[in-house]
């Protein structure tokens, strides 16, 4: 039976007892694949396995440390993913250029590269979310001793992503974030009502 105070991230399966852990496992897998792709691309561009193995070993060390939630590896993961995203973007641009100039290009490759770029950007962005940072470091918003009142829930400010205890029934357009002074209710939220 699920507890009403349990935090479930949007898009996660409600049966998961640790949504941050599940997200971390998926991110670790993407980092492993990106590390292997990075090593292969280095070999293709440099042509020497001896030179390409050095960044390959480094990226695999980052993956192993990231999988074990080492603090030093946290920002290396999105940097490796960002480097691969940049490589994929260049390859996508070249394939699009070839497609429009009549050179041989694969539409399938263009679609795969587009999806890889989209997915990579999503996995890079989660590293900037404060709840994921807390989960990676082993903390939880519930470790802070937060006591929620009746009808309150934890929510992130839409601007600075600060985690706040709010009562959604009492929120109004005049309410602002205590950290960044931005409105907590956006105009998009008002149009849905």
Image: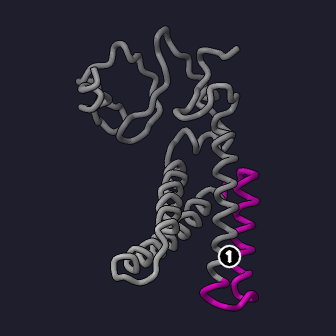
Residue 152 horizontal side relative to residue 37, left or right: left
Assign the C terminus to one quadrant of the image: top left
> Which residue is painted at 57% across and 63% down in the image?
81
> Which residue is painted at 60% across and 87% down in the image?
45
Assign the N terminus to one quadrant of the image: top right
Residue 95 horizontal/vertical position (percent) = 44, 76
Q: Quadrant of residue 177?
A: top left
Residue 135 horizontal/vertical position (percent) = 63, 40
User: Does 52 sit above or below residue 8?
Assistant: below
Instruction: State how many labels appear.
Output: 1
Comparing 60 with 145, the one in front is: 60
Residue 190 horizontal/vertical position (percent) = 25, 25
Q: Residues within 10 Å of mark 1 (few under 14, many from 20)?
A: many
Comparing 104 with 1, the one in front is: 104
> Which residue is painted at 32% across and 29% down in the image?
184
What is the magenta segment's predominant secondary structure?
A: helix
User: Does 18 sit above or below residue 40?
Assistant: above
Q: Which residue is mark 1?
A: 39
SS for dot 1:
helix
> Which segment is the magenta one?
43-72
Residue 132 horizontal side relative to residue 93, left or right: right
Residue 60 horizontal/vertical position (percent) = 73, 67
């Amino acid at each position: 039976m699920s507890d009403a105070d349990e935090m479930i991230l949007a898009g996660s399966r409600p049966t998961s007892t640790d949504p941050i852990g599940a997200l971390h496992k998926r991110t670790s897998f993407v980092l492993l694949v990106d590390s292997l792709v990075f090593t292969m691309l280095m070999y293709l561009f440099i042509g020497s396995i001896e030179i390409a193995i050095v960044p390959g070993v480094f990226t695999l060390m980052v993956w192993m440390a990231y999988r074990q939630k080492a603090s030093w590896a946290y920002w290396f993961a999105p940097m490796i993913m960002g480097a691969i995203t940049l490589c994929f973007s260049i390859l996508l641009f070249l394939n699009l250029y070839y497609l429009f100039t009549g050179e041989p290009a694969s539409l399938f490759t263009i679609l795969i590269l587009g999806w890889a770029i989209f997915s990579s950007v999503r996995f890079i962005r989660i590293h900037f979310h404060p709840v994921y940072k807390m989960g990676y470091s082993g903390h939880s918003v519930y470790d802070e001793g937060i006591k929620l009142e009746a009808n309150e829930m934890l929510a992130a400010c839409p601007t600075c992503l600060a985690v706040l205890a709010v009562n959604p029934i009492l929120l109004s357009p005049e309410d602002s974030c205590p950290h960044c002074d931005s409105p907590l209710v956006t105009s998009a939220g008002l149009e849905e009502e």
